[in-house]
Image (cartoon, rainbow, N blue to C red):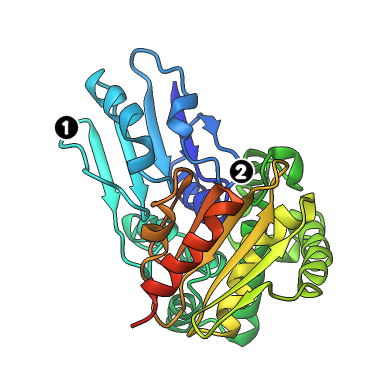
């Protein structure tokens, strides 16, 4: 048996789309909401099983990965998040790039020598690498309208991944992956009225309108914080709302706090676009936190730790 393990956001889904358009193989899909990243724990692996892992932190899955490798399982691993120590094992193929201006889909694009380049650009837009995606799209000959289309689809796929549970999402990421795999190009998705594009488009706008009506609860020259209520729409919009805010003010960091059922916070942190570093390091100082240099999060931040979080962010971007 082969397992395809992937993050439920745009980057994870589109990374796998590229691989399986290039090399279709039967596989058991293992994914979840965007914050569900310790996915290797979900696999009950048996002799001769192989695994592909895309867009989840190797550091957060280290113990399960080492166990698989020590048992002789072949693992292909591509990612751009904090990785920790990469195991030196002959059974591991690791494509890891921690550059703040790349994403897993671009790593796969390079691996496949640009075979499905438009999909990779779409993922870069979805991962909020707007300048990088624009650069690649212009180099590929895409006009303004095509770039807008790729950005919108990437954003919508990414939007679908946010939530505390699968019931918050419009599509289970595994289902969305299967639906999108039917299209060799993202432009084909947009052109098909029966694709997920239209449903996600209308749902996204409805959620975004609610978020835009909320004022910041904290604001300084370095950081603005927005608090959203404990509702499904809040959890869905939190990440892409943070991206939108970051693009509007590229010299500031932004945090979107979504109230959990226990009255603590789910946190989405965006580093300043003009200083894309430190977000993962900040969030990793909290028990349920992690991420990458430009964007990171904390699954459960207690209210009494919020002041410490603000201090760490302010200190990180002071100079």
Which element carries disc 2, helix, strand or loop?
Answer: loop
What percent of the width, then of the height, locates residue 90? 16, 32
Q: Is residue 137 above or below residue 26?
A: below
Q: Is residue 184 visible?
A: no
In the displayed structure, does residue 164 sit left or right of residue 170? left
Find disc 2 in the rendering and name its residue: 33
- Reading the image, the residue beneath label 1 is 90
Residue 143, quarter of picture:
bottom right
* Image-based side of 87 in relation to 104, left or right: left
- Mark 1 and mark 2 residues within 8 Å of each other at the beta carbon: no
| Front in this rendered view, residue 247 or 106 | 247
Q: Secondary structure at mark 1?
A: loop
Left or right placement of residue 89 versus residue 83 in this view: left
Q: Quadrant of residue 220?
A: bottom right
Percent position (x, y) of residue 263? 70, 47
Crowding at label 1, few (<14), some or many (≥20) Cα neighbours within 10 Å?
A: few
- In percent of the image, x 77 and y 74: which residue is there? 212
Q: Is residue 96 visible?
A: yes
Q: Residue at x 46, y 81 (%)?
A: 131
Kindly report the distance in space between the C-alpha atoms of the residues bearing marks 1 and 2: 31 Å
Q: Position of residue 208 (x, y in %)?
A: 77, 68
């Amino acid at each position: 048996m082969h397992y395809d393990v992937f993050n439920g956001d745009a980057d994870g889904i589109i990374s796998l789309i590229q691989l399986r358009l290039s090399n279709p193989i039967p596989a058991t899909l293992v994914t979840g909401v965007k914050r569900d990243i310790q996915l290797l724990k979900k696999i009950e692996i048996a002799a001769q099983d192989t695994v592909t892992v895309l867009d989840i932190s190797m550091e957060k899955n280290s113990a399960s990965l080492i166990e698989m490798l020590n048992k002789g399982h072949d693992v292909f691993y591509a990612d751009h998040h904090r990785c920790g120590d990469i195991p030196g094992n002959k059974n591991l193929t690791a494509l890891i790039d921690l550059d703040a201006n790349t994403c897993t889909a671009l790593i796969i694009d390079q691996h496949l020598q640009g075979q499905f380049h438009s999909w990779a650009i779409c993922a870069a837009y979805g991962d909020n690498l707007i300048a990088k995606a624009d650069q690649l799209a212009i180099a590929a000959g895409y006009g303004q309208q095509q770039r807008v289309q790729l950005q919108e689809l990437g954003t919508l796929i990414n939007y679908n991944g946010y939530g505390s549970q699968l019931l918050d999402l419009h599509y289970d990421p595994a289902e969305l992956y299967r639906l999108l795999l039917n299209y060799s190009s993202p432009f084909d998705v947009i052109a098909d009225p029966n694709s997920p594009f239209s449903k996600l488009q209308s749902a996204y706008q409805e959620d975004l309108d609610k978020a835009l009506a909320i004022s910041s609860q904290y604001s300084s020259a370095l950081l603005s914080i927005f608090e959203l209520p404990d509702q499904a729409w809040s959890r869905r919009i939190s990440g892409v709302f943070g991206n939108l805010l970051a693009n509007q003010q590229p010299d500031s960091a932004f945090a979107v706090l979504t109230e959990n059922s226990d009255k603590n916070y789910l946190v989405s942190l965006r580093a300043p676009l003009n200083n894309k570093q430190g977000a993962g390091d900040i969030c990793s100082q909290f028990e349920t936190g992690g991420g990458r240099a430009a964007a990171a999060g904390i699954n459960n931040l207690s209210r009494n730790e919020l002041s410490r979080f603000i201090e760490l962010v302010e200190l990180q971007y002071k100079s």
